[in-house]
Image (tube, rainbow, N blue to C red):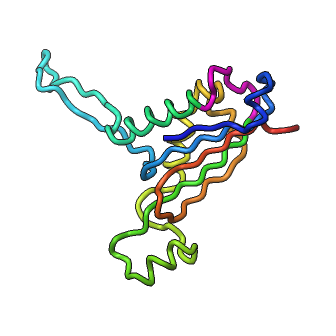
Amino acid sequence: MRSTDSPSDRNSPWEGKSLISITMTGTPVGQARPRFRRTPIKLKKRKGISYSYPEPVSAAYKLALRWCALIAMAGRKPFTGPVIVNIIAYFPPSMHLSRQGRKDALAGKHDHLIRIDKDNIEKLVLDSLKGIVYVDDKQAVDGNTRKTYSEKPRIEIEVTPRED
């Protein structure tokens, strides 16, 4: 895991006008649906108590991403105004591709169309950064999310305040 901010911000006081850049290595994960479970305890005429819990893989990824965001913020306060969030998710090429297909994927000739939806990646990232980089995820008013192939799977996130 690696987190950085722009070099100009390291020497200047936090003024809310800087770029926050977060890079986390590992295959990106999207926000999964919650899981449901029913307890076997029977109360009166009920069959048990149902409850939901987060999917473990996306919950662990979200926690790791929050730690990277804390490192990138270096104790500074979160943005309070509208922000632009740009996300690039790098996935490893599938092992089922031929040698030529793998080269084409890494060269950018094929889009990443399998597995994780773009909106699920966005949702996980926006929820993870809430309260650390910005106060609430409703502040993300603009941005771009891209999925691509790379030999080094990772996710790169840039958050900047929107200039009006």
Q: Residue at x 72, y 45 (%)?
A: 142
Q: Which residue is situated farthest in the bottom direction here?
A: 100
Residue 136 at what x, y percent from top left? Answer: 63, 28
Vertical order, 98 against 122 (above or below): below
Left or right: where 76 falls relative to 69: right
The magenta stretch spans which residues?
72-82
Q: Residue at x 52, y 72 (%)?
A: 106
Would you identify the image quadrant in which residue 146 lies?
Answer: bottom right
Residue 46 at what x, y percent from top left? Answer: 16, 22
Residue 45 at what x, y percent from top left? Answer: 13, 20
Would you identify the image quadrant in which residue 52 lies?
Answer: top left
* SS majority, magenta: loop
Q: Nearer the viewer, residue 133 or 106?
A: 106
Q: Residue at x 48, y 67 (%)?
A: 113
Q: Nearer the viewer, residue 105 or 39?
A: 105
Residue 73 lies in the magenta stretch? yes
Would you identify the image quadrant in which residue 36 lies?
Answer: top left
Left or right: where 28 falls relative to 13: left
Residue 67 at what x, y percent from top left? Answer: 49, 30
Q: Quadrant of the C terminus?
A: top right
Residue 56 lies in the magenta stretch? no
Vertical order, 29 against 74 (above or below): below
